[in-house]
Image (spheres, helix red, strand yellow):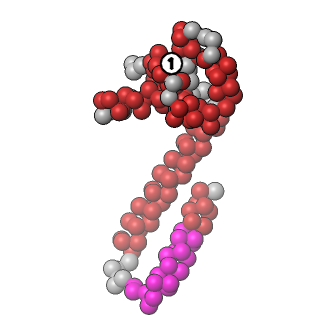
Amino acid sequence: MFPTHMVVFFGAAPFMLANPFWIDVLRHLMPDVYVEISRRVVYAEAPKLIHWAENNPVMAAYGTAHEFEYSGKVSTLEWDVFLDPNLVRRLEIVLTERDKFLRSRATIERSRQRSSSEDEPPSAPSTPSSPLNAADTTFSQSAITTENELTILR
C-alpha cells in the first residue's frame, strides 16, 4: 500500500507557510482554512502547525510539487473519496444495463450481417454523390437500425 500524500507531507507545513506562492494558493482555494492558519501561525508552535496540515489537499499539492522538483518523478497519489452507497449502486445498475444493451446490439448486428451475407448476393458499394448525401444516408440507416433494435428489445 502506498502512503497517503495528504498525510506524508504534513511535516513540511512550516515551509509551505513561509512560501508566498503557496500561501496565495491556500488563500484562493481554501479561504476559510487560510484565515484559520493565519491566526495560528503567529503564536503556534511548529507541531501544532504540522497537525493542521495533516489532511490538507493544498499541503499534499505542495509536497508533491517539491518532490517532483527534487526527484523529477511524481509518485503514486492516494486520495480518499467517500461516496453515497445508494449513488454507487445506481451507477452500477446503469453501467450493467448499458453493457447488456451494447452486447445485445452487437449480437443483433452479427445476426443481421450473417443473414444478409447468406441471403443476398454481394452488391457493389454505393457511392454517394456528395458528402452531405453520405451523412444523410448514414444517419437514416442509423436511425432505422436504432428503431428496429428498440422494437426487438421490447
Expressed as whole percent of the image width and height from the top left, the position of residue 12 reads 46, 19
- Quick check: can you spot residue 137? no
Image position of 133 with respect to 111: above or below? below
Along the line of sight, the residue nearer the viewer: 47 or 76: 47
Residue 95 drawn at (x, y percent): 55, 43
In the structure shown, which secondary structural element does the residue marked by tag 1 occupy?
A: helix
Q: Residue at x 64, y 27 (%)?
A: 34
Q: Position of residue 19 (x, y in %)?
A: 50, 29
Q: Quadrant of residue 55?
A: top right
Residue 40, by quadrant, is top right
Q: Residue furthest left?
A: 71
Residue found farthest to the front: 42
Q: Which residue, given by chain and number where applicable, does mark 1 sit on? A: 14
Horizontal side of 35 relative to 112 (left or right) equals: right
**Residue sitting at 36 percent across and 82 percent down?**
125
Quadrant placement of the C terminus:
bottom right
Which amino acid type is marked by label 1?
A: Pro
Residue sitting at the far bottom: 129
- Asked if 86 appears above or below 140 in the picture, the reply is above
Residue 144 in percent (x, y) is at: 57, 72
- Residue at 45% from the left image edge and 62% from the top image edge: 109
- Left/right placement of residue 136 relative to residue 33 reads left
Q: Is 83 in the magenta?
A: no
Above or below, 140 against 19 in this view is: below
Q: Residue at x 32, y 29 (%)?
A: 70
Please state which of residues 90 and 31 is positioned toward the viewer in this rendering.
31
Q: Is residue 101 visible?
A: yes
- What secondary structure characterizes most of the magenta part? helix
From the viewer's perspective, is 114 left or right of 96? left
Q: Which residues lie in the magenta part?
A: 126-145
Neighbours of disc 1 within 10 Å: few (<14), some (14-19), many (20+): some
Image quadrant in which you'd find residue 110: bottom left
